[in-house]
Amino acid sequence: MRTVDLRSDTVTSPTPEMRKAMAEAETGDDVFGEDPTVRRLEEKAAELTGKENALFVASGTMANLVCQLTHCGRGDEMILGDQSHIFYYEQGGSSALAGVHPRTVPNLPDGRIPIESIELAIRPKDIHFPKTRLIVLENTHNRCSGSPIPPDYMEKAGTLAQKHGVSVHIDGARIFNAAAALEVDVKKLTGPADSVSFCLSKGLAAPVGSLVCGSDSFIEGAVRQRKILGGGMRQTGVIAAAGLVALTEMVGRLADDHANCRRLAEGFANIPGLSVNLDLVKTNILFFDPIKENLPADVLVNALADNGVRMLALGPKTIRAVTHYHIQPDDIDYVLNVMNRLLSK
């Protein structure tokens, strides 16, 4: 049976070019700073994001935690959206491991946090309060329909942070999707931030890894935090090689994923029994609701899976589909045909 996997862009497999690069990678001991392939990847990441330096880590969750540990001390506070990936999906590592107090502020439907709300959340000097050290922004915003956050907002957030002497971290797991959707250089999005992390194993299709980017002094501190988390790896060039291919060959094709997602969304919008907000569909993530009577999200997801279409139910009413490198236009046609058939019963 045909399978179309839309659960996440993390399901992507490395390209043939990545596999070849991995097999031929020049390696060394990265803990000693001697892996030349890792260094090339870190230099490329720093160049693309406009930062002085970068650090290769095992995952996006580790990248975000390394940044929290580097920016904050125990008992310090970070401000982040109430729909943020760090708050929802990283198992409370900010509290359990970093000792950082999360203060959540409501996200707007497009993923932004109102600037005035951030400013109101910054603590005044008072011995009863934790110290506000960090503002965390997510771009694109996963739980907010994969929305890209535009440069003017990022600039305002950076200006606010400077005014109050706090740092800005961007959870940029899909930052290159944001840049592609907004048709801007990624530096326009990362410029106001003190640190940014991005993932290689989502839309960029590498098998594993994320990058943390920032100043030389920040990365010096981040290296220590990576080590304490058990992230010091050895001949890491084997996987870093795939990341280099991802950054040189996969960034430019992300718009194809966005086009496929838009096509899927418009198709669903024309199927009775589904509700789609097309205004929020701007990258490769689609949220939609089954509104047919007696058809909860998990039941529809299971029925789709029986027909080879894999998606995720996010609660009783909402389903997520994510397009990626392995999804082609004919896959979209197949999914639309399956959905039409299921909803017509």
Image: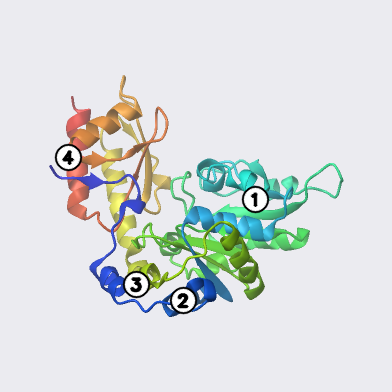
Residue that carries the numbered disc 1 in the rendered image: 98
**Local SS, label 2:** helix
Q: What residue did someone put label 4 on?
A: 337
Furthest residue in direction top, as rendered: 294
**Quadrant containing the C terminus in the rendered view:** top left
> What is the number of the mark on residue 44?
2
Q: Position of residue 332 (x, y in %)?
A: 22, 48
Disc 3 versus disc 4: nearer the observer: 3
Q: Who is closer to the viewer here, 104 or 179?
A: 104
- Lower sequence index among marks 3 and 4: 3
Residue 300 position, x and y percent, is 28, 30
Distance from the alpha carbon under mark 3 to that under mark 4: 35 Å
Q: Nearer the viewer, mark 1 or mark 3?
A: 1
Q: Which residue appears farthest toward the left when viewing the image?
A: 1
Q: CA distance from mark 2 to mark 4?
A: 42 Å
Circles 3 and 4 in contact, beta carbons < 8 Å: no
Q: Disc 1 to disc 2, how far (Cα)?
A: 28 Å
**Vertical arrangement, residue 70 with respect to residue 271, above or below:** below
* Quarter of the figure with residue 236: bottom left
Which disc number belongs to residue 245? 3
CA separation in Å, label 4 and label 1: 48 Å
How far apart are the two marked residues, 3 and 2, measured between alpha carbons?
Answer: 11 Å
Residue at x-position 39% and y-position 68%: 243
